[in-house]
């Protein structure tokens, strides 16, 4: 069956109770494991909020520690801490506590319901500036710590780009629920008013319009994203998907290949390319992508179909 995703630009994630035991994950795989959009994770990587390693082709690779860092960001967001505040605190930790390997994993909310952020470091809680808040040594459990008043207004005002980023982050929270797509669109549009060159915002806005069935609007925003970043993975994948739906197979193939150049380990691309090549009666190329899919996702939802397709084309070649 030819399955086309109607929710964002990637198939529904298979819920994983534990992180699979492999050394590194591509960005799309990390996004699935953490249940965030690839565009959101890619933006955090580009803006150095999270710092994965890179392979020889300069593709980000997420190890276990990187996944823990991203989960730390998500936890702070769930507790009501805005993305720009998280970023400012991470920058402060990097400046004042440079010996910390991963400041994101060290950030904590001071008390439940509080918006104060502290850092756990060598048995103590510190302000991100390095000032000690609470030394655990010699403090009994029933002692209530006395801490200096934290003034959120002491942080500098948001820049325009940070306001756009905050709106983008809010849009990401809203665009996965059909009931809040209109609010997501509003967030993304406001973000683009502030930062018209925000490629990820264009891409996500296109995805929301696609989910609402507004294909012309979706195509316009995917194309706008690609004018800003011609190698944008999700925009190329999305636009290829949309073009294939309306019968523009050559255009779809072009954008799938551009997406594949951006991330050759993206399983969904190999699925779509294999199916498209089958439709174009090019079985050798289809078989190549079915085999590549099995290399990168041998237990995925399409693995059984891929194995059957590979076996069938091999039998056809032997008979021929």
Image: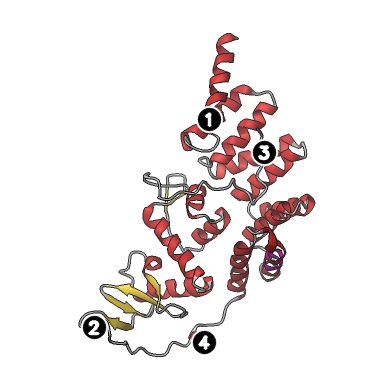
Q: Position of residue 207 (x, y in %)?
A: 68, 54
Q: Is residue 186 magenta?
A: yes
Q: Residue at x 33, y 83 (%)?
A: 131
The one nearer the camera, 31 or 254, is: 31
- Which sits earlier in the primary sequence, circle 2 or circle 1? 2
Q: Which residue is mark 1?
A: 304
Q: Which residue is mark 3?
A: 254
Disc 1: CA contacts within 10 A as few (<14), some (14-19) or many (>=20): few
Chain part drawn in magenta: 184-189
**In the structure shown, which secondary structural element does the residue marked by tag 3 occupy?**
helix
Q: Is residue 231 visible?
A: no
Pointers 3 and 1 in contact (C-beta within 8 Å): no
Quadrant in which residue 212 is drawn? bottom right
Quadrant in which residue 191 is drawn? bottom right
Q: Position of residue 303 (x, y in %)?
A: 52, 33
Q: Which residue is mark 2?
A: 140
Q: Position of residue 24 (x, y in %)?
A: 40, 47
Left or right: residue 64 compared with residue 263:
left
């Amino acid at each position: 069956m030819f399955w086309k995703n109607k929710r964002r630009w990637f198939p529904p994630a298979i819920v994983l109770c534990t992180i699979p035991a492999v050394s590194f994950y591509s960005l799309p795989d990390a996004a699935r494991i953490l249940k965030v959009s690839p565009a959101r994770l890619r933006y955090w990587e580009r803006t150095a909020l999270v710092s994965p390693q890179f392979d020889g082709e300069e593709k980000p690779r997420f190890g276990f520690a990187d996944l823990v860092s991203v989960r730390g960001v998500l936890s702070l967001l769930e507790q009501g801490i805005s993305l720009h505040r998280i970023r400012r605190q991470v920058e402060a930790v990097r400046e004042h506590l440079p010996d910390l390997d991963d400041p994101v994993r060290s950030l904590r909310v001071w008390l439940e319901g509080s918006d104060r952020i502290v850092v756990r470091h060598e048995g103590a809680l510190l302000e991100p500036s390095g000032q000690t808040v609470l030394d655990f040594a010699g403090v009994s459990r029933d002692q209530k710590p006395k801490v200096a008043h934290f003034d959120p207004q002491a942080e500098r005002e948001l820049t325009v780009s940070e306001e756009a980023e905050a709106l983008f982050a809010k849009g990401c929270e809203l665009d996965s629920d059909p009931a809040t797509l209109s609010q997501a669109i509003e967030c993304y549009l406001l973000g683009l008013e502030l930062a018209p060159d925000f490629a990820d915002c264009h891409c996500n806005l296109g995805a929301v319009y696609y989910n609402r069935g507004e294909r012309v609007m979706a195509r316009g925003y995917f194309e706008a994203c690609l004018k800003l970043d011609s190698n944008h993975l999700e925009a190329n994948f999305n636009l290829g998907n949309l073009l294939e739906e309306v019968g523009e197979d050559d255009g779809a193939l072009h954008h799938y290949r551009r997406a594949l150049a951006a991330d050759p380990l993206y399983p969904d691309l190999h699925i779509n390319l294999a199916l498209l090549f089958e439709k174009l009666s090019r079985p050798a190329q289809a078989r190549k992508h079915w085999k590549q899919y099995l290399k990168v996702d041998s237990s995925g939802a399409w693995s059984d179909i891929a194995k059957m397709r590979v076996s069938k084309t091999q039998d056809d070649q032997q008979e021929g």
